[in-house]
Amino acid sequence: MSSFVYPENQVFSFCGHIEDRPSSEVKSGYVVADTAELAIASMRDYGFVVSAITSLSEVKQTVSILELIAQQHPAVEPSEFVDVYPAQIRPYPEESVFCFTGHVVDKYGALKAGFIVASDVEFVINYLQGLGFIVESATSLGDLRQVMADMLKIAADDHSFDHSCVVNVKAAA
């Protein structure tokens, strides 16, 4: 997929909920737009409230960081992620290395993000909530690799990918 139809900074993955529905009913998908701000505004026009959004270039960077954490590479200091993984398995399994976003104290607080190694996503959410953190998203390295693969297909306008979960609001060239 060497030739992209859409630049990496214009293909986004998002999650959120349908307006007037409980925010616990989280939905996700992909959107192509000139900027994240335009993507969020367009999704709002469709009655969807975006709680987290990230570009393909950001996903690629996050996958690289998670891979370094999983390998326990010396370039990543132990202080740069939370390690609550219960076993001494090394390298860490990719389904146990997570990135997360959310807010401290309340959902209107400043958005925070980080990395954690834990047994599963439920533990991640419960652990962070126990610290007073409201989790907006938590994604494992394995899941994020799949998201990245999907986003690469969208960027290349690969017709083998099911585009039914993609909203394209990009202005015509």
Image (cartoon, helix red, strand yellow):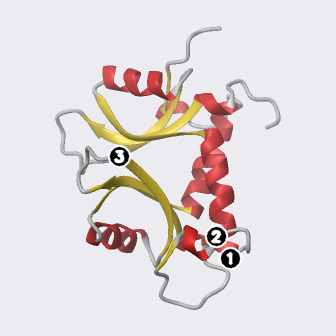
Mark 2 touching mark 1, by CB under 8 A?
A: yes
Residue 97 bears which disc, if any? none
Mark 2 touching mark 3, by CB under 8 A?
A: no
- Please report whichever mark, 2 or 3, sits nearer to the chain's N-terminal start: 2
Where, by quadrant of the figure, is residue 63 drawn?
bottom right
Q: Position of residue 89 (x, y in %)?
A: 61, 88
Mark 3 touching mark 1, by CB under 8 A?
A: no
**Which residue is most to the top?**
173
* Secondary structure of residue under mark 1: loop
Residue at left 25%, top 48%? Answer: 107
Q: Which residue is mark 1?
A: 72
Q: Position of residue 48 (x, y in %)?
A: 31, 31
- Please report whichever mark, 3 or 1, sits nearer to the chain's N-terminal start: 1
Above or below, 48 against 142 in this view is above
Q: Which residue is mark 3?
A: 110
Q: Which residue is mark 2?
A: 69
Mark 3 crowd level (few <14, some 14–19, many ≥20, 10 Å Cα): few
Residue at left 73%, top 74%? Answer: 74
Mark 2 crowd level (few <14, some 14–19, many ≥20, 10 Å Cα): many
